[in-house]
Amino acid sequence: MRIHGWNLLKVGTTVCSLQFFGTRFVTTNVSPTNTNKMADWKSASSVYDFTVKDITGNDVSLEKYKGHVLLIVNIASLCGLTATNYKELVELDEKYRESHGLRILAFPCNQFNGQEPGTSDDIVCFAKKQNAHFDLFEKVNVNGDDASPLWKYLKHKQGGTFGDFIKWNFTKFVVDKNGQPVERHSPTTEPHKLAAVLEKYF
């Protein structure tokens, strides 16, 4: 529905504004299927070769982020790490989005103890309650054969300790202004500790 030029989404008794996330589309409920494009992820030269779906189900070419430092993270609403990560991701976004062009790309994932079980509508409302303005995308898998090609690429370019697989919610990838994944940080790395890291790439 629209109220005074704002597109609003009602979830239960909560009304969420999709304008808040820079979009004018109504969200759709989607399952965590492989909706990201670029099946041949091994041939990608940068993250700009990928097209993903935003939280509203619309295709987004990552070329739109050229020239920006990116922080790409798999998020969840019911994780023990949720409160700290959301709070500090919001703080990073507020500190660096306008001044340095940081873009945080958040991908909901339900692969870790079912800690992101909600619909796209639920995720939008939860993020809004956390005062999150960063870019939300459709729920994806980050591990397994049906993992998002983007996430397969990220893991390939920046392997993790004890294996490339994503260990838990809130794994963080730093991507430089040329679209190259340059660092990977664990779920337990608090976002505020990445400030000095990000400043190296601005």
Image: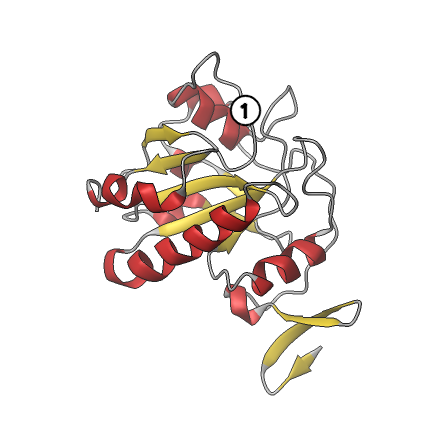
- Residue 22 horizontal/vertical position (percent): 50, 66
Q: Residue at x 50, y 51 (%)?
A: 86
Residue 39 percent location from the top left of the image: 56, 26
Q: Residues within 10 Å of mark 1 (few under 14, many from 20)?
A: some
In the image, farthest residue toward the top: 162
Whole-percent x and y of residue 29?
A: 75, 52
**Residue 64 visible in this rendered orientation of the protein:** no
In-front residue for pair 78/65 = 78
Is 181 drawn above or below residue 195 in the view shown?
Answer: above
Residue occupying the point 69% across, 53% down: 120
Q: Is residue 181 toward the left or the right of residue 6 in the image? A: left
Q: Where does label 1 land, which residue?
A: 167
Residue 145 percent across, percent down from the top left: 64, 19
Q: Is residue 148 visible?
A: yes
Quarter of the view holding residue 28: bottom right
Asked if 8 appears above or below 101 in the picture, the reply is below
